[in-house]
Every structure is written in structure tokens, then in C-alpha cells.
Image: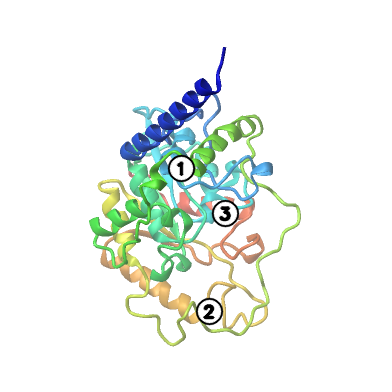
Amino acid sequence: MITSRFLRNVLIKGLLLFAALNLVWAVFNPSLGSLSSYNILFKGRERLPFGEDSARSYNLSLYDLDAMFASLKLAGTQKSPDEFRVFVIGDSSAWGTLLKPEETLAGMMDAAGLKTAGGKAVRVYNLGYPTLSLTKDLMILDYAMQYQPDLIIWPVTLESFPRERQLLSPIVANNAQRVAKLIDQYHLVLTPPVDNTTFWDKTLIGQRRVLADLLRLQFYGVMWSATGVDQTYPTDYEHAARDLEADTSFHDWAPPNLPADGLAFDVIQAGMQAAGDVPVVMINEPMLVNTGKNSDVRYNFYYPRWAYDQYRQAFNQNCAAYAWTCLDLWDAIPQERFTNSAIHLDPLGEGMLVEKIIAVGILNSK
């Protein structure tokens, strides 16, 4: 006969066991991100997980790099001796907002059937991630080096350079320890983020949201594998502004000059160091160059002409001074090929960009 005393003892023992499990979990703080159903039960994703409408995109934003990379087809692809592996890092334009995976810069380059001068097959992987921050790019590049790239293509734009933007990306803010280590390792002119993680945060209860996101990412693998859909594609969206205000400000800066150390070129230098012997091609990515109202004051919604012109000058000067391999393609794509942002291209625009990159011959000597 089950008595109330027996039930009470079972409850007390269960609570004590759960409390002990929480304490042990917090002490060892294990990472479960690398445990993934992708590339085993489901096909690997073509780009890093990011999503704001999970029900329709079969995707979500989370900040565990282990889990994010484990979901990629890259993690399940053994590098063969005849593969020349190319990574594309960068912002939402590289990730491919409003583009299907095969329509992105990486997708089109991968489908082009390119071969190096030495006869190796070029395989291109999309490691772009939305939000504008060079430090975010550095963090992803640093993590990705374990996957043995042979070439890194890094599209950038001025909006990723201001120092005030470097730690604002949610994925940066949620990886404070990792970012602080990078700042210290490469002596970046940034204030290391404060890690406010408490002992309680490391317990099972404290990590319930993180663990729930990990499980959700696995569940969405079912629909991703079946449909290939990883973002929403609205038929009607607000196009990038063509008629602009006569505003000359850029962030808190006003003409005539950008602050001497306002742009984080040291983060680019850190990326070059993180890449080691792997070549990096920097691309000043195409942007919408307006011809509408006040186009003599601003190139687009993001940039007044004075600020962007000074950035381009600094970009090219740094490329020359440090012998970086750089392509300045800022005005290479006509304005009608941009979609909902001054840096987002449609499939035809991406195709034009791919052609220009291939034409430069960055693979010819490989």
C-alpha cells in the first residue's frame, strides 16, 4: 500500500536529486550544441540559423556557435584532397536576406562548377550572418578555421566599421567570454563586454531557454530537410528608399571628417591574423547608389556622401598599407537590383556580383 509518507519521501528524494543534478551541471557547464540531428537524420543547412518567424521559416536565431555550425552541411562534409574550400563571411547581404540558399553569393559560386588552376573543385560555404559588426564576423571566422578553409571571402560595408557598433549584435552580446578573449588576443581597441553569467544561469533551470532553443532547432530540421525553406519570402515588401532627407549626419558624426580612430580597421587586421596562412579577399560590397531626391547629399539611407567617400579612401589606404587583397565593388551593381535595403541584392544582382568576383581571377593561381 502506497502511503502518504512514501509519496513524501519519493518527492523529497526527487527534489534533492534534481537539485544535485543542477549543481553538477552548473559546475561542469557542459555544452550540448555539438550534439545535432543535422547531417544524420536531416540534411545540413546551407547557412547559419537565423530567423524571426520560426513557424514559417523553419528557422530561429540562437547564439550557441557549436549548435549553429553543427547544423550546417559544412559540419557533415569531409574535406577531400581535391576540394578547394571557400568560406564567405559577412553580414545579411552575404547570408542572403530575401534570397534562397542557391541564390546567395556563396550558393551561386558553389553552383558555378569552378576549378582552381591546379584542378581542384571549388566548394563554397555560406558563413554570413545578419547584423552589421566586424567583430561578429571575426568571431565567426575564428570559429570556422577548424573546418580547414583554403580561401576566405569577406564582404564588408561602412556600417559594420564604427566602433560603437562592434558589440551591439545580439550574437556578440551573447558570447561575451568568446569576444573578450578575441579582444585580448588581438589587442583590439574595444572595451571587453562584461560577462554577467551567474552560477544560477549555468544550472539546468537557468539554461532552460538555451536548451529549448537547441531542441527547437532540431525539430525545425524536419521541415527544412523536406522543403529547403529557411526564411520567409514575402511577395510584397518595402523597397529601399530612393528619395532621401538632406541629412549629412552619420551616427553621431558630422562633416567634414570621420574621427581618426572611429572605424575598426584593427578588427580587419585581427581577422587576417586569425586566418593565418589562409588567403582572405576583402570586398567593399556593392551598395545602392541613389539618383533620387537629395542623392547629391546621400548615396542611400545608410550613408551621406562625405562619410562614405572618406571610408572608401581609408579602405583602399589600409588595403595598400597592409598588402590585403581587396576588391572595391561599391558601385558595381545598378540600383534597380537592390531589394529591401541598400546592401541587399536580388538574384540577378547576385549573379552580376559573382561574375565580377570570378572575373578578377582570385582562383587562377591556386
Q: Is residue 124 visible?
A: no
| Mark in the foreground, 1 or 3 | 1
Q: Which residue is mark 1?
A: 207
Q: Which residue is mark 3?
A: 352
Task: Work out how far the residue at label 1 is from the one at label 3, CA to CA, in angstroms.
Answer: 45 Å
Which of disc 3 and disc 1 is earlier in sequence? 1
Looking at the picture, tell me which residue is in the foreground, 259 or 176: 176
Quarter of the N terminus within the rendering = top right
Task: Work out how far the residue at label 2 is from the one at label 3, CA to CA, in angstroms.
Answer: 25 Å
Q: Are marks 2 and 3 in contact (CB under 8 Å)?
A: no
Task: Specify the label residue 304 is tagged with.
Answer: 2
Task: Specify the label residue 31 is tagged with.
Answer: none
Who's the residue at 37% across and 36% down the image? 25
Which of disc 3 and disc 2 is earlier in sequence? 2
Q: Are marks 2 and 1 in contact (CB under 8 Å)?
A: no
Say what secondary structure mark 1 lies in. loop
How packed mark 3 is, by other alpha carbons closer than 10 Å (few <14, some 14-19, many 20 or more), is: some
Residue 69 lies, in percent from the top left, at 44, 39
Residue 49 drawn above or below residue 8: below
Q: Is residue 264 left or right of residue 287?
A: left
Circle 3: residue type: Met
Quarter of the C terminus within the rendering = top left
Looking at the picture, tell me which residue is in the foreground, 315 or 332: 315
Residue 365 drawn above or below residue 272: above
Residue 354 lies, in percent from the top left, at 52, 50
Say what secondary structure mark 2 lies in. loop
Circle 1: residue type: Gln
Task: Work out how far the residue at label 2 is from the one at label 1, CA to CA, in angstroms.
Answer: 44 Å
Who's the residue at 67% across and 63% down the image? 336
Who's the residue at 63% across and 35% down the image? 228
